[in-house]
């Protein structure tokens, strides 16, 4: 595998950071983005623009009018269309060098392993904890890197899970009780957290920089501040406690 003259020019500014070999590492990396909404839309844009060789998009929903304040891959003309199809149309135009694949399915315990099996890195761009914990368990079992982000209102959180080396979502949050109904969100909040998800994925894929390991990053948009909370693996975690 090599970089074409067009790719060398396209990625020139980031090759200045991590070199041609780093860019080749991105090209060899498959990233699976689960959820193509408020988090998944900007994450998919930046992952595609960065030159991850293969981007897999997973979502079952269709575009609705209420999505459009934050789900920037989807436009007014896309209302009623499957989100993965709407995303595919834009991303293939953004970077034709990247293989974009779509899976129009809801994540379930009986299909999640098949969905993530070829991914090197999985992005949790979901909006509910039941599905997040399904993905977390599968990534631990398959030893896949999982990058979690969550948002509400002006606030967000970020966490990188490397099975066997860092806490998993269950270690930190356990069985979270779902809140019912809609939750507030303004577009820039998921955009900030999704950008950080892709930044962590780039660092992990290329080996450039220091990934966010064993820490929970908290963003508080009301006064624009970031803080880090140290986190540890739970030896008795039913999901990852058995891993070496």
Image (cartoon, helix red, strand yellow):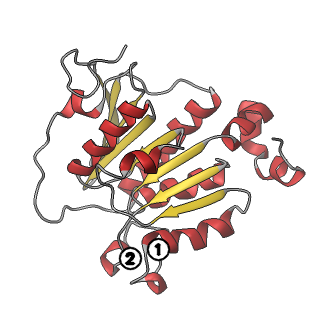
Seen at 75% across and 47% down, the residue is 11
Q: Residues within 10 Å of mark 1 (few under 14, many from 20)?
A: many
From this view, report whether residue 46 is shown above or below residue 36: above
Place of residue 79 in the rendered image (x, y in percent of width and height, measured from the top left): 40, 83
Q: Which residue is mark 1?
A: 74
Q: Is residue 223 visible?
A: no
Sequence order check, earlier mark of 1 and 2: 2
- Left or right, 16 with reference to 156: right
Split into 4 quadrants, where in the image is the N terminus? top right
In front of the other: label 1 or label 2? 2
Q: Secondary structure at mark 1?
A: loop
Q: Which residue is mark 2?
A: 63
Split into 4 quadrants, where in the image is the C terminus? top left
From this view, report whether residue 206 is shown above or below residue 129: above
Place of residue 194 in the rendered image (x, y in percent of width and height, measured from the top left): 44, 49
Splitting the image into 4 quarters, where does residue 207 fall? top right
Pick the front one: 203 or 242: 242
From this view, report whether residue 171 is shown above or below residue 185: above
Seen at 44% across and 49% down, the residue is 114
Q: Residues within 10 Å of mark 2 (few under 14, many from 20)?
A: many
């Amino acid at each position: 595998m090599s970089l074409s003259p067009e790719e060398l020019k396209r990625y020139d500014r980031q090759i200045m950071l991590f070199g041609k070999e780093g860019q080749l590492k991105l090209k060899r990396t498959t990233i699976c983005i689960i959820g193509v909404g408020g988090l998944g839309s900007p994450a998919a844009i930046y992952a595609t623009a960065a030159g991850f060789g293969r981007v897999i998009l997973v979502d079952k929903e269709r575009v609705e009018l209420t999505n459009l304040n934050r789900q920037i891959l989807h436009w007014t003309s896309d209302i009623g269309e499957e989100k993965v199809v709407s995303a595919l149309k834009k991303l293939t135009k953004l970077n034709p060098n990247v293989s974009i694949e779509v899976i129009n399915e809801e994540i379930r315990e009986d299909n999640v392993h098949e969905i993530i099996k070829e991914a090197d890195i999985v992005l949790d761009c979901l909006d509910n904890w039941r599905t997040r914990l399904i993905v977390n368990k599968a990534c631990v079992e398959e030893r896949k890197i999982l990058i979690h982000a969550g948002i509400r209102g002006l606030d967000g959180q970020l966490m990188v899970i490397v099975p066997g080396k860092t806490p998993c979502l269950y270690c930190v949050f356990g069985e979270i009780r779902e809140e019912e109904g809609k939750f507030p969100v303004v577009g820039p909040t998921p955009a900030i957290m999704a950008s950080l998800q892709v930044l962590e994925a780039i660092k992990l894929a290329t080996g450039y920089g220091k990934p966010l390991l064993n820490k929970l990053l908290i963003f508080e948009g009301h006064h624009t501040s970031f803080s880090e909370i140290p986190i540890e693996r739970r030896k008795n975690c039913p999901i990852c406690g058995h891993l070496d």
